[in-house]
Amino acid sequence: VLTGNERYELAVRRSPDAETIVEVGGLRIGGDRLVLMAGPCAVESEEQLFATARAVREAGGHVLRGGAFKPRTSPYSFQGLGLDGLRLLAAAGREVGLPVVTEVMSPGDVDLVAEHADILQIGARNMQNFPLLDEVGRSRRPVLLKRGLCSTIEEWLLAAEYVLLGGNASVILCERGIRTFETATRNTLDLNAVALARRLSHLPVIADPSHGTGHRELVAPLSLASVAAGAQGLILEVHPQPASARCDGDQSLDCAQFAALAAQLAPLAVAVGRPLHDAVPAALAGVAP
Amino acid sequence: VLTGNERYELAVRRSPDAETIVEVGGLRIGGDRLVLMAGPCAVESEEQLFATARAVREAGGHVLRGGAFKPRTSPYSFQGLGLDGLRLLAAAGREVGLPVVTEVMSPGDVDLVAEHADILQIGARNMQNFPLLDEVGRSRRPVLLKRGLCSTIEEWLLAAEYVLLGGNASVILCERGIRTFETATRNTLDLNAVALARRLSHLPVIADPSHGTGHRELVAPLSLASVAAGAQGLILEVHPQPASARCDGDQSLDCAQFAALAAQLAPLAVAVGRPLHDAVPAALAGVAP
Amino acid sequence: VLTGNERYELAVRRSPDAETIVEVGGLRIGGDRLVLMAGPCAVESEEQLFATARAVREAGGHVLRGGAFKPRTSPYSFQGLGLDGLRLLAAAGREVGLPVVTEVMSPGDVDLVAEHADILQIGARNMQNFPLLDEVGRSRRPVLLKRGLCSTIEEWLLAAEYVLLGGNASVILCERGIRTFETATRNTLDLNAVALARRLSHLPVIADPSHGTGHRELVAPLSLASVAAGAQGLILEVHPQPASARCDGDQSLDCAQFAALAAQLAPLAVAVGRPLHDAVPAALAGVAP
Amino acid sequence: VLTGNERYELAVRRSPDAETIVEVGGLRIGGDRLVLMAGPCAVESEEQLFATARAVREAGGHVLRGGAFKPRTSPYSFQGLGLDGLRLLAAAGREVGLPVVTEVMSPGDVDLVAEHADILQIGARNMQNFPLLDEVGRSRRPVLLKRGLCSTIEEWLLAAEYVLLGGNASVILCERGIRTFETATRNTLDLNAVALARRLSHLPVIADPSHGTGHRELVAPLSLASVAAGAQGLILEVHPQPASARCDGDQSLDCAQFAALAAQLAPLAVAVGRPLHDAVPAALAGVAP
C-alpha cells in the first residue's frame, strides 16, 4: 500500500488495537464514539456565530468550528475577521459549553490562536507548510490536520509525523476531498483514504463532507458514508442562512438540516458500532434555548 | 452540478420519486432493497467457478459475476476463457439459481453473450465505446454500465443515454473508482458520484469496491460506505483462493470474507432504509450444499 | 521510469538507434524528418473537405486527416457522415495527392475503413478497446494509436504491443493530451510523454496540440513545443471556417493560420535537427489551385 | 479560458504588448531574451556549491539557484543548511558574479532571506500560503512564484495578484509540473500553462523541467520544449555529482550536461526569436577558471 521508502516512528500503527484518543476538555476524540464538529465556514458576526453555536449544541454537536483567518484563493475575497473572529469564537464556545476549532495559517499566529481555540486546524493548503507543522508541534493544543487537495496518503501521514516529532501527540487526521478531473463536485471525498488511514495509523480520523463535495445536498449521504467507512468524526459547515454566507454557502447546511443529519446519523453510527458521543446537555452548557 | 450544455431525454430524473427497477428473473434491482453481485474476476475453471457460485448463494448473494472475455492491459496476460467461460458461467448460475452478469467487449459479441448471460456488463474501459453502447442498446438484456476510469459523471449519464436511446430501458449505473494521483490504492472509489447519480438519475446505482480500492482489506469498509452513500447494490470480487487467482487476487475476498461482509452489511442496510433482498433459498436453487 | 512488471517483446527499443519508419505511399513517418497531418475534425461536406485538403497541401502538409465515424460524448451530437465521409475523404486525398488518416471505432469496420484510408486512427477513447486493437493488428494499414485521456505511458506502450503482436508492425504513437484537474484548457498536452516515448520505443511519436489544448490560440506554441520535445510529426485540426465547424471549432485553425504555423515550424524544425519533409508539389498532386 | 468569476487588477495583461521586465542587478528577466537559472537542489557544502556556481557561470547561466531552507516531505530527510546555506549561496553568487535565487518558506524568514538572496522563491507547496505571499509582497526583492502541484492556472494568477497587491511588482511565474495519474514521470510539466500564462499575463514566465519531469534524461528535451512554448527562462538543477546529491539527484544534470544543454538551447532560442542573454564574462565575474 505505502511505498516502503519512508521512515515512520510515530504516525503509524504498531499493533492492531493501538488507538490514540485526543482529549479536549472532557471530550474524547478517537476510539468507538462518533464526534460531530460543526459551525460556519467563517465567523461573520456575533449574531451569526452565536445562533449557529446554539443550533450546533442543541442538535447534539460536540465541537464548534469557525474560521477567523481564512485562506482565500483571491486577495479580493473576505479574509476573515482575524483576532476579532477568534474572540467571538471563544466566547461562543464558552456560551454553549463546546470546545472550538479554528484554522491557523502562519507560524507567528500559533500562540495567539492557541490562546483562544481548543483545537488548531491546519488547512488543506497548509498540509505541507513545514514551518507551520513544526510550530504546532511545539504547541500543547491538539491539531486537526487536513489532507492536502493533492497530497497522497503517505504525504499526509508524514505531515502528521512532523507534528508528532515536534512533541505534540494529539493529532487528528481529516480527509476533506481531493482534486480530480471531476467538475460536477467541488472535490472528490476520498473514503478509501479514511479506511486506509484507520488501518495504517492509530490517530483519530475524521471527514469533512462539506468541502469533500461542495454541494449541500450531497453532505448528508457522504456524512453517512464517511462514518460507514470508518470515520470517527465529521466536521460540517453550518450557517443560519447559507444563501447569505460570506463563503462556502453552497456547501453549508442550515441549522435544521444539521439537526436532521445528526438524527439520521444516529442509527447508522450504532449499526457500525461507533455510536455518537452524548450531546452536551443544554443545562450544562448554560444556555436557555 | 452538471454543465448545462448537454441534452438529456432519458437518463435523468424528471421527478423526485421516479425510480427505474431493472428486473432480472424475479430479482428487482433498484428501489429500496440492496442487491449483492459477487463472483470471480475471471472464470478460470469449473471447479473454481462452481465453488464460488455456491459460496455466493449461501452467503446471500443475488447475482453471480464472472469474466469470460477479459480486457487486459497486456496482451501477455490471461485473456479469459471466452465462449467456454460463458458456458461455465451460465451453467453455474443455473446450478445455484442465480442470474449471471458478465462483460461484453465487442459489438460483434453482444448476441453471443446475451445468449448466456442475464446482464451485460460494459466495462470501465468501454464506457465510451459508442458502437458497443449502440449494440447493447438494441439488446433485450439489462446493461450494467461501469463508469470510466476518468469519465465525468456527465459523460457517464450520456453513455447511459446512448443505451437508453437505442431502445434498452434497463441500465444499471456502476461506480468503480476513478484514476487520481493517489498510488496507495488502485483507484479512488468516488462515492460523491454514487450520491449524485442517485439524485440526478432514476436508474439504479451500484458500486464496485473491489476495483474501487484494489485491496481486499478495504473492500468491507468501502462496501458499507457505498451503501450508506446511496448505492442500491454492490458488485464484489470473490475467489475461493485469492492468492492463486489469475487476475485481481489482491482485491478479491475469499468465500468466508464475503459471507462475513454480507452479514456485516445487513444491519447497516436496515439502518439506511435499504435492507438486503432476501437470499435465494438453497432449496430453490437446487443445490445440496 | 516504467514499473518493471510488464513484458514487452515488440514495442520497446532494444538499441539506441533502432527507429521504425512507417511508410505510407512515398512518405516516411519517423526518423529525422517532420510530418504534418492536418484536416477537419469531421468530414462535413465535399466543399468543406476539398477546400481544406487544398489548403493543407498548399501549406506543406503531408497527410490529410478527417473524421467519418466520430466518437461523440452525446448521442445527440453529430456522429459523422460514416461511409459517405470515408468516400469523400479518399476522393479528397486523391485529388490533392495526399494520403489520408481517419478513425475506426469498431472491429467490424476495420476492413471498410482500410479500403478507403491509408492510415487507421485508434482514438483516445479506444486505446484500450482490445478487440479493436486485435483487429487493426491484422490489418495491413499503418495504425495511428492515440494515447488515452487517462492512460499511463506504460499502458500506451502495451496497447501498441497488442497491435504489433497481431502482426502489424506499422504503429505511430500519438500524444493528444491527458485529463487533469486543470479547467482552463481542454486537456493537458503531456510532452514528458513525447520525450519519454521517444526514448522507450522505436516507434514514431507524434503530437496532437489541437486536442491537447482545446484552444486555437495555444495550438501554435504547443506545436513548436511538441517538435522541440521530440515529436516526429503533428496532427492538427484545420477548418475553412472554424466558427461554423460541426465539432471542435474552438481548437481548429483556419487555413491561413495553418499555413502560418507551417512556416513558423520550419526554422525550429531545422534547429532541432528534424526538418520538415518536402511538401508535395502542386503539380504532382494534380491540382490547379 | 478562465472562469470569469475572479477579479484581476494587476496580474493579467491589459494590452497585447504589455511586458513586465524584472530587473535583477543588470539582468533583465522577461521580454525577448532567454534566462538560465541553475544550481543544486540544496546547498550542501562550500565545495559542492562553488564548483556548481563556476560551472553554471562558465556554461552561460545567468542566475545561481540553491536551496538553504528545504521543504521536505519527511521530517527525517535533510532539511537544508538554513542560515549557513544562505551565506554560502550569497558568497558563491558574489564569487562568480551571478545573482542568486533561493526559497523562503516562512513569513518570519522573508527579511533574513532577502538580505542574502536576489530573488525570493515561493515553492510549489507554498503557492497558496497566503501569509507568505503577503509578506513577500512587502519585500523589495523580486519573487519567483512556482505554480502549485495541483493549482489551476487561475489560482496561480491569483497568487501572483496577492504579491502584486502587496506592493511588489516584480513577480516571475514558474511552471514546475503538476500532479497527474502518470507515474513514469515525477510530475507532468504543463506547457499549455506556459503558453497560456504568456497570453494572459504580462509577467515573465519560466519553466522548471527538472521538477517537471523528475528524470535527468528528460530535462534536455523538455527544456527545449519549454522555450518553444514561450518560456522566457529555465530553472534547472545542476550538481557536480548527481549520484551523491542529498536531494533530487535523479533529476539533476551534472556540470557537463548543463553546458551541453545550454549549447543545445542556443539555436532553438534564436529560431523562436528569444535568444539567450549574453553570458556573464569570466573576467567580470572575477573568477580564474
Image: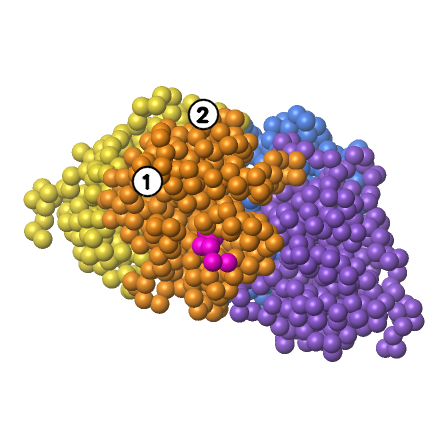
Chain colours: A blue, B purple, C orange, D yellow
Q: In the rendered image, which residue does mark 1 sit on?
A: C284
Q: Which of D93 and B164 is in front in this view?
A: B164
- Chain letter of mark 2 equals D
Q: Report the residue at 88% width, 69% height from top.
A: B285
Q: In which quarter of the image is the N terminus of chain C?
A: bottom left
**For discs 2 and 1, the disc positioned in front in the rendered view:** 1
Q: Nearer the viewer, residue D65 or D114?
A: D65
Return the x and y of residue C23 as percentages of the image width and height.
Answer: 37, 54
Label disc, if present, on residue D229 of the rendered structure: none
Label disc, if present, on residue D8 of the rendered structure: 2
Question: Is D62 displayed left or right of C188 in the figure?
Answer: left
Q: Report the residue at 63% width, 76% height from top.
A: B244
Mark 2: secondary structure: loop
Q: Quadrant of residue D48?
A: bottom left
The answer to whether one can see residue D11 in this image is no
* Farthest residue, direction right: B283
Return the x and y of residue B230 as percentages of the image width and height.
Answer: 76, 48
Q: Report the residue at 66% width, 54% height from top.
A: B107
Q: What stretch is highlighted in magenta?
A: C139-148
Asked if residue B187 is positioned above or below residue A210 in the image, the reply reads below
Is circle 2 on the same chain as circle 1? no
Return the x and y of residue C115 as percentages of the image width and height.
Answer: 51, 50
Mark 1: secondary structure: loop
